[in-house]
Image (cartoon, rainbow, N blue to C red):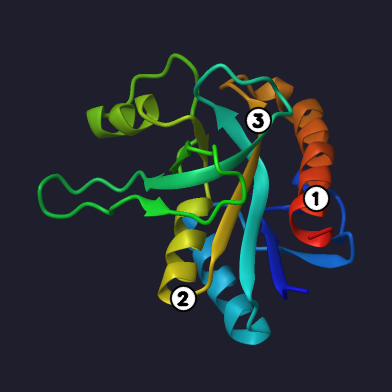
């Protein structure tokens, strides 16, 4: 069996300490915390793969609770023509997955006016969240395969989060078992 490092931002997304015998590690909310803590965990645990899971915002027409396997992840960093971070391709188990994830340290709120670079990424991605780009970047640096599973918890309307997150987490546990435990 693979040695899996299972990471999420916060226990508020799941309230469990493990899934099917695999411990869940909290890496924190936002890119800096998630990147630093993931690197520390990789150095300490030396896993075969890293799986990041958690809630995300809906940028397309998905249903709350739907779990999406991320194929490409984009960063919100903008420095004009000086520098841009390239998107990172993730490992996937589902051949038809082409979900594009936008990682930002800014909460997305429906109807807000954002910088043109933010709007461009948001408009060209399927989901939005706050940790996956930095986790994937650390995994690439350490040459460890990384997978990302995000469930739709809201579409910019904050009061839907808790109920949708609970449904999404239950759906993720089933996918995790099928894809990684029962293999």
Q: Name the residue under label 3.
A: 152
Q: Quadrant of the C terminus?
A: bottom right
Q: Is mark 3 on a helix, strand or loop?
A: strand
Q: How far apart are marks 2 and 1 (CA)?
A: 25 Å
Q: Position of residue 179 (x, y in %)?
A: 74, 53
Exactly how many numbered labels are in the figure? 3
Q: Residue at left 63%, top 83%?
A: 46
How crowded is the residue under tag 3: few (<14 C-alpha within 10 Å), some, or many (20+)?
Answer: many
Q: How far apart are marks 1 and 3 (CA)?
A: 20 Å
Q: Nearer the viewer, residue 79 or 133?
A: 133
Numbered disc in front, either 2 or 1:
1
Q: Name the residue under label 2.
A: 143
Q: Where is residue 167 in the image (x, y as percent from the top left)?
A: 82, 31
Q: Residue at left 22%, top 52%?
A: 84
Q: Which badge, 1 or 3, is on the more N-terminal residue? A: 3
Does 128 appear above or below 114? below
Q: Residue at left 62%, top 66%?
A: 50
Q: Nearer the viewer, residue 117 or 70?
A: 70
Q: Mark 1 points at which residue?
A: 178
Please say if the residues under marks 3 and 2 sit with CB atoms less than 8 Å apart. no
Q: Is mark 2 on a helix, strand or loop?
A: loop
Q: Distance between the residues labelled 3 and 2?
A: 29 Å
Please say if the residues under marks 2 and 1 sit with CB atoms less than 8 Å apart. no
How crowded is the residue under tag 1: few (<14 C-alpha within 10 Å), some, or many (20+)?
Answer: few
Numbered disc in front, either 3 or 2:
2
Q: Which badge, 2 or 1, is on the more N-terminal residue? A: 2
Q: Position of residue 109 (x, y in %)?
A: 50, 23
Q: Residue at left 70%, top 23%?
A: 64
Q: Is mark 1 on a helix, strand or loop?
A: helix
């Amino acid at each position: 069996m693979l040695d899996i490092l299972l990471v999420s931002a916060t226990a508020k997304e799941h309230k469990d300490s493990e899934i099917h015998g695999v411990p869940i590690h909290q890496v924190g909310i936002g890119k800096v915390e998630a990147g630093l803590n993931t690197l520390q965990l990789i150095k300490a645990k030396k896993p075969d793969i890293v799986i990041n899971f958690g809630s995300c915002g809906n940028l397309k027409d998905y249903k709350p609770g739907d779990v999406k396997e991320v194929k490409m992840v984009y960063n919100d960093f903008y420095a004009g023509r000086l520098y841009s971070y390239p998107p990172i391709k993730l490992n996937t188990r589902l051949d038809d997955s082409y979900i594009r994830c936008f990682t930002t340290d800014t909460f997305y709120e429906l109807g807000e006016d954002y910088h043109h670079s933010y709007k461009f990424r948001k408009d060209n991605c399927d989901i939005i969240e706050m940790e996956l780009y930095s986790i994937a970047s650390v995994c690439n640096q350490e040459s460890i395969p990384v997978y990302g599973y995000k469930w739709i918890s809201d579409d910019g309307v904050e009061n839907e989060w808790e109920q949708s997150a609970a449904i999404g987490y239950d759906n993720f546990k089933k996918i995790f078992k099928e894809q990684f435990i029962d293999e």
